[in-house]
């Protein structure tokens, strides 16, 4: 590619990505902890479903926009920003309508309906905010993404203070959503990063061969997780969903680590392939080590600290630490393989793997939930993670051997 981003070391790129992802995830972690501590298990479960819906929406816009910027963006061409932001808005508007419809389908006297309505109102600028972060990553300037995340954290804190008094889980959710929405709207207004909707639609259509595979892959993955959690809630109640969400929160730093490595390294490895093998191996080894450290930490942590973090949800989440942690270790063991496949733009390979593993994962999670509620869910998670990781490494080795990577998209044509 022409006009490669500035050549920085892989550790420096990785560190910048980790810092940005760390700030973002710290905000999410605080939101989850506050929601757990200031509400019943049922209300926390409702907020957990809201987070699940948000992640699903985010996976759509990332596949159509963010990923295309990372693998094909010219760091010196600002047209990509305008196309990306406008394309995100075009994509997120119908998603907001779907979330609102889901809210209408929920019981009016239950905790889930208002959670979905707030998300529907805020999801467009929340997705725009995420696209601005990916623009920064594509230009090898992850600290700019960190600045965006700091702004969200500040608005979130202001929102919490604005409520005053004793917070509820729903108050925390509103502060988190509105805080991010304010940053998304403000960033769009300040940068004037918009273009004609028709241009953005044409850009997405041109890149659909690659992004279409990514979106099917991401939506499939998030849908499996969402369906499995909704099934767990139907079979065992929202408190069981809260337990799973609680233990996943405990391993949030691991997700931060992987997200930071992915965002910080992908664009760099696309332009400097000589580091690829060494970096990919280091990514997987480091992530597995971090997962095992996390298991050990949460096993020995005092009950008082756990309760301070998750409130009434701590006891049920603590019981899931070892099996869920093992599942996370198996999941991140394939971190290097997935990063390599993305670098090679092997969208057809990752999609094929996802379509094979998704029904297996869903069947194992739902069967586990029916067998033994949240405990069975985590057992299904362990087994499905092992299968998915094995498939990803097999796929990467195959693509690396056979070559013929798919062409990267042009984000500014």
Image (spheres, rainbow, N blue to C red):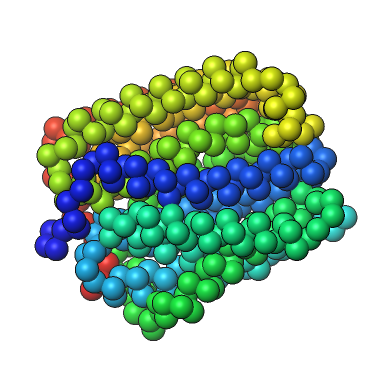
Residue 329 in picture, x, y percent from top left: 45, 24
Q: Residue shown at 48%/66% (left/top)?
A: 128
Give the left or right position of residue 232, taking residue 363 as reference. right
Q: Is residue 185 above or below residue 360?
A: below
Residue 127 in picture, x, y percent from top left: 51, 62
Q: Is residue 69 above or below residue 283?
A: below
Residue 114 in picture, x, y percent from top left: 77, 59
Q: Residue shown at 68%/41% (left/top)?
A: 33
Q: Residue shown at 82%/40% (left/top)?
A: 40
Q: Is residue 28 visible?
A: yes
Q: Residue shown at 26%/28% (left/top)?
A: 281
Residue 70 in picture, x, y percent from top left: 30, 56
What residue occupies the far bottom of the structure in this picture? 196
Give the left or right position of residue 214, taking residue 394 as reference. right
Q: Is residue 131 above or below residue 321?
A: below
Q: Quadrant of the C terminus?
A: bottom left
């Amino acid at each position: 590619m022409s006009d490669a981003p500035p050549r920085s070391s892989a550790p420096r790129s990785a560190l910048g990505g980790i810092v940005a992802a760390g700030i973002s995830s710290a905000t999410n972690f605080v939101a989850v902890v506050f929601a757990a501590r200031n509400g019943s298990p049922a209300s926390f479960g409702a907020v957990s479903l809201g987070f699940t819906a948000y992640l699903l929406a985010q996976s759509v816009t990332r596949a159509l926009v963010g990923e295309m910027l990372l693998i094909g963006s010219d760091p010196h061409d600002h047209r990509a920003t305008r196309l990306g932001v406008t394309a995100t808005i075009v994509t997120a508007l119908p998603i907001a309508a779907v979330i609102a419809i889901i809210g209408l389908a929920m019981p009016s006297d239950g905790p889930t309906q208002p959670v979905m309505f707030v998300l529907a109102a805020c999801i467009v600028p929340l997705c725009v905010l995420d696209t601005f972060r990916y623009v920064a990553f594509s230009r090898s300037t992850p600290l700019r993404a960190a600045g965006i995340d700091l702004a969200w954290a500040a608005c979130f804190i202001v929102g919490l203070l604005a409520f005053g008094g004793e917070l509820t889980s729903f108050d925390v959710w509103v502060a988190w959503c509105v805080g991010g929405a304010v940053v998304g709207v403000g960033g769009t207004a300040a940068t004037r990063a918009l273009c004609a909707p028709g241009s953005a639609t044409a850009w997405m259509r041109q890149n659909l061969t690659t992004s279409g595979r990514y979106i099917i892959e991401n939506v499939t993955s998030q849908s499996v997780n969402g369906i499995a959690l909704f099934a767990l809630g139907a079979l065992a109640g929202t408190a069981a969903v809260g337990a799973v969400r609680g233990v996943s929160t405990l391993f949030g730093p691991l997700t931060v680590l992987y997200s930071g490595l992915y965002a910080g390294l992908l664009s760099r490895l696309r332009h400097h392939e000589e580091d690829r093998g060494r970096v990919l191996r280091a990514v997987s080894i480091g992530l597995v080590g971090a997962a095992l450290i996390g298991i050990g930490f949460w096993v020995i942590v005092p009950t008082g600290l756990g309760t301070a973090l998750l409130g009434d949800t701590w006891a049920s989440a603590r019981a899931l630490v070892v099996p869920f942690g093992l599942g996370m270790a198996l999941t991140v063991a394939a971190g290097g393989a997935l990063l390599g496949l993305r670098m090679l733009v092997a969208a057809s390979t990752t999609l094929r793997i996802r379509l094979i593993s998704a029904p297996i994962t869903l069947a194992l999670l739902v069967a586990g939930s029916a067998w033994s509620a949240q405990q069975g869910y985590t057992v299904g998670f362990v087994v499905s993670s092992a299968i998915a990781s094995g498939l990803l490494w097999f796929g990467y080795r195959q693509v690396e051997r056979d070559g013929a990577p798919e062409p990267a998209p042009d984000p500014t044509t």
